[in-house]
Amino acid sequence: MSDNELFPVPAEWASRALVDAGKYAAMYAASVNDPEAFWAEHGKRIDWFTPFTKVKNCSFEPGSVSIKWFEDGITNVAYNCVDRHLEKRGDQVAIIWEGDDPSESRKITYRELASEVNKFANVLRNRDVQKGDRVTIYLPMIPEAAYAMLACARLGAVHSIVFAGFSPDSLAGRISDCGSKIVITADEGLRGGRKVPLKANVDAAIARLDGGLDHVVVVRRTGAPVDMEPGRDVWYHEAAEMVTDECPVEHVNAEDPLFILYTSGSTGKPKGVLHTTAGYLVYASMTHQYVFDYHEGDIYWCTADVGWVTGHSYIVYGPLANGATTLMFEGVPNYPSNSRFWEVIDKHKVNIFYTAPTAIRALMQAGEEPVKKTSRASLRLLGSVGEPINPEAWTWYHRVVGESRCPIVDTWWQTETGGILITPLPGAIDLKPGSATKPFFGIVPQLVDAEGKVIEGAAEGNLVIAESWPGQMRTVYGDHERFEQTYFSTYPGKYFTGDGCRRDADGYYWITGRVDDVINVSGHRMGTAEVESALVAHEKVSEAAVVGFPHDIKGQGIYAYVTLMAGVTPTEELRKELVAWVRREIGPIASPDLIQFAPGLPKTRSGKIMRRILRKIAEDQFENLGDTSTLADPGVVEDLVSNRQNKR
Ligand code: WTA
């Protein structure tokens, strides 16, 4: 794709948008030249019980990494997302909930939201949840997920949402890592007409925990019969009947934790990314307003799941802090048909639509007809997140879904960043298909080479961020050393993103994907090490190495090289068994797409697996294997190449 194919800002956008090109340039310059003044001003976008007097106090120096924003201010996230709107917009819809089944939907006003959040908070308070306590949430996409998040925030408790597609094992690991004593779940989840046994998964997770749990709060979703342990388990609807809908709001410090969200890294177990209160909310709400050019009365829909960071920042916290109407969707893009997204847009007159490239690519394969039969006249802006969007998918999204009328904001960010860092602002920046374009206010991206030298101008390198921003994660829960090691040691003094990136002659950023051992499957982050350790936990597996490979719909697929125990015969059946095993150990999103049985893996003489070679083989780049002379047994490679799974 040429760097010069440009989609200029449409004229009506330049005049109507919050920010045009001139204003972007001025605000960006102000934000990086005098961050103190810039954020002192924008910190006022949220309400404070005690205003801050300090703005920024951050160090990226290894050994003393510390990030604090607005550190002496006192506020509360739930107050900002709910209470402060009641006077002006109590009767405005806060959440439109669209069920998996198209006949089910609900609208929740800000006043109703206040009442639901307070009730939920009281139910938690009655179960001894206090400021600072960790609360695990394992819920499907139902309004109670938002109520539960905001209820925790109201009490100053710290939520840890575990995506409802994760297995009991993954859930248990996350419960014990953060030491939560309470889990909020549902009887079952419902997605694409299929039921997910959430309460049964929680029970299975508890069985793996030393010390168990004090409380399980169960929301009734499908009405399926589930086991309830007296004294520990309670139905939410019954508990909610015993409480009022008034609950005092906890005054919390700007730097008190708001949530933990586990995410995969290149090594070891998933990390508990910790976000705090005020900086996070300022940044999530500000990016939501400017990136989506949110205007009063707009209907906004982000299709993510609240189990991922996109759901946290851009379904719940950002939009609600802005008093927006946010749509929450329980289902999937292709149920009951491939028109579902577009039908929901027509049904609720959605103006702003934010989804992932993997969904676009899958729908693109179904052709234009399922799109064309809907109106989509309400749409004004489209967004993309989670992985690089290939120019073909971008162009289809723009031309077919948006009828060449709606700009696309390709938003690059991470669980760690709390909010969007590199993105077009739709009224200000001309678009290039496949480019996340320019930094948001206050963001200082740099490209560095392998030695850490900053490269200027048009170049490709590793993406680092040189200065802190308010939405940045503060630590890895319980392991600050790992935080420093993971993000600040590779290029000392800078935040390392783990992504590769190219900057073109116009200063546009093009994210090229992860440069570490993280793969991005359908926009979900997966550590190769996690899948490997699941595989080797199987009794017939002696060794495993996992890499990503290009996949038409998922972006990347999971390719596993597996060495079996001596005497075990590789069969098709065993291959299936191993796929099912990984699904059970981690969850369906981790299922290997291809498993290649390999009698040996390429290793250096010191025993280190040469992943570079395995990656090339998985990508079918056989000519490009590089230097194999340092291998302990170069013959292994030939064997792997000739047995490459599903040769294309
Ligand atoms: C990738 C999701 C290219 C990237 C918000 C990043 C993207 C990882 C984009 C974070 C984008 C996200 N273009 N790549 N617009 N957005 N990524 O933590 O590799 O689930 O490091 O956060 O997704 O994934 P995470």
Image (tube, grey):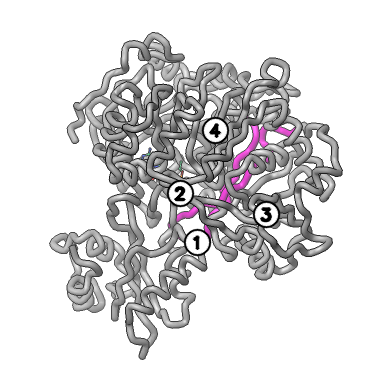
207 vs 541, left or right, is right
Read off the magenta span.
252-278
Task: State which quadrant residue 92 falls in.
Answer: top right
Please identify, in this view, whether the residue under mark 3 or under mark 1 is nearer the observer: 3
On the image, numbered disc 3 is attached to which residue? 223
Image quadrant holding the N terminus, namely top left
Please identify, in this view, whether the residue under mark 2 or under mark 1 is nearer the observer: 1
Q: Residues within 10 Å of mark 1 (few under 14, many from 20)?
A: many
Give the residue type at disc 2: Ser
439 vs 186, left or right, is left
Give the residue type at disc 4: Leu
On the image, numbered disc 1 is attached to which residue? 587
| 177 w.r.t. 153: above or below | below
On the image, numbered disc 2 is attached to which residue? 489
**Observer able to see residue 481:** no
Q: What percent of the width, then of the height, locates residue 314? A: 53, 34
| 152 w.r.t. 52: above or below | below
Of labels 2 and 1, earlier in sequence is: 2
Task: Report if residue 585 lies within the magenta region.
Answer: no
Q: Quadrant of ligand 1?
A: top left
Q: Residue furthest bottom?
A: 567
Mark 3–mark 2 distance (CA, rounded to whole Å)? 50 Å
Mark 3 and 1 residues: CB-CB less than 8 Å, in contact?
no
Q: Quick one: SS at disc 1?
A: loop
Mark sitting on residue 327? 4
Mark 4 and 3 residues: CB-CB less than 8 Å, in contact?
no
Mark 4–mark 2 distance (CA, rounded to whole Å)? 40 Å
Of labels 4 and 3, earlier in sequence is: 3
Q: Quick one: SS at disc 4?
A: strand
Mark 2 and 1 residues: CB-CB less than 8 Å, in contact?
no
